Amino acid sequence: MPQGNPLEVPDDGLTTRTRRNTPVLAVHTGEGKGKSTAAFGMALRAWNTGLDVGVFQFVKSAKWRVGEEAVFRQLGRLHEEHGAGGAVEWHKMGAGWSWTRTSQKPDADVEHAAAAADGWAEIARRLAEQRHDFYVLDEFTYPMKWGWVDVDDVVEVLLTRPGHQHVVITGRDAPQRLVEAADLVTEMTKIKHPMDAGRKGQKGIEW
Amino acid sequence: MPQGNPLEVPDDGLTTRTRRNTPVLAVHTGEGKGKSTAAFGMALRAWNTGLDVGVFQFVKSAKWRVGEEAVFRQLGRLHEEHGAGGAVEWHKMGAGWSWTRTSQKPDADVEHAAAAADGWAEIARRLAEQRHDFYVLDEFTYPMKWGWVDVDDVVEVLLTRPGHQHVVITGRDAPQRLVEAADLVTEMTKIKHPMDAGRKGQKGIEW
């Protein structure tokens, strides 16, 4: 794929090199599995090439993806101690980020909404500062869907972000304006799932 | 998800624990991106819980996924040197595996077909020996599609594999018999791709 020729060359006045170096805004959406898993797989590749990776989890899910978090923390240590790959930061809404709020009572929707809004504000600051090279905004479609974060603001910030920062957003029901703004949109569709057959999730597979 | 209740409990005489511990056969197919990336993301989780991971790449693609390979080799070293996670083996068709063939002239289709058949035979042996806990058969749908490997044989071996071995198979055009045999099937659909806009792949993103 990387060596393949594009189907059509756009009349945008850019050279192939410029186009190649355009930072990517990717969205993984749909009802199926693999949206976040594929995002973390992309983050692996990014880490391997020395990119600074920032993960921001917006919705409490599957035990916070403890497996991925543990591995990325190991990779972060490999970077700090041995200079391998890139730096890693991992933040969870309500836990990792209390950047602007003073209290932590995550029981009411209003608290969750405030945490999501704070989280997005922090990410927007980081994008402005070019703090990371590769951002995973995990399950970030939900705060947009629920109106906790303004979609137009998100799209504006993403489209005008400076430098060369890649962003991957995951979650079902990606807003249409986000899909339009994105460079790469993949929909994961469930064809068959073990839980349909009455199975529950298991360690090492689901988390 | 892991803690969720299944939609229906099947009348199969199994306890929830037995069902939960059933090893998974997963297939990632479709035209979109993320099939392999999500498989490697699953392998990350598996590694983190101490499972022994074996990766088998069947088709030369995107520089052999050098990024993922580099990271998994690091993880394998973390296991060997510090006891973290599980063991990792990574094999490439024609490179890593020359288990039965003596010559390596990968220029003709017949050579590729023989390499794929050898690769599958080795995997079948490993499944019989319960050599790994988590197998990624990357782009393994293609040798089946091209008739290099017999689908019925694959399905038979997978369905009768002993012990508790998880298998994830990736690639477009998964054969129907494989889909029927699988527990978890996800289709990745391309909604939008940067190459449609004339962009080429870039380091850290595509490989």
Image: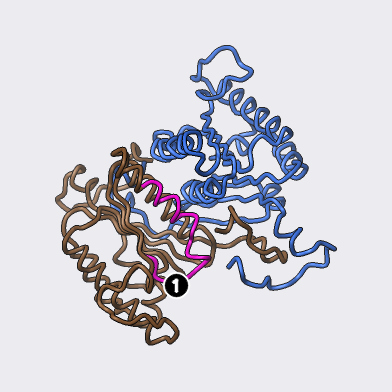
Chain colours: A brown, B blue
Q: Chain of mark 1?
A: A
What predominant SS class does the magenta segment belong to?
helix
- How many other residues sit within 10 Å of disc 1, few (<14), some (14-19) or many (≥20)? some
Q: Nearer the viewer, residue B195 or B186?
A: B186
Which quadrant is home to the C terminus of chain A?
bottom right
Q: Is residue B140 magenta?
A: no
Q: What is the x, y in percent for residue A198?
A: 72, 66
Residue at image point 26% right, 70% down: A155
Q: Nearer the viewer, residue A61 or A104?
A: A104
Q: Nearer the viewer, residue B84 or B168?
A: B84
| Residue at image location 81% in from the left, 61% down from the top | B14
Left or right: where A44 falls relative to A192: left
Q: Quadrant of residue B154?
A: top right
Left or right of A105, for residue A65: right
What x and y, as percent, mark residue B195?
A: 33, 49
Percent across and percent down for residue B185 are 61, 55
Q: Mark 1 highlights which residue?
A: A173
Position above or below: B133 against A156? above
Lateral position of residue B66 relative to residue A80, left or right: right
Q: Which residue is painted at 68% across and 32% down in the image?
A: B126
Residue A167, percent across and down? 30, 59
Q: Which residues are magenta?
A: A56-75
Query: Which residue occupies 27% across, 50% down?
Result: A52
Q: Quadrant of residue B116?
A: top right
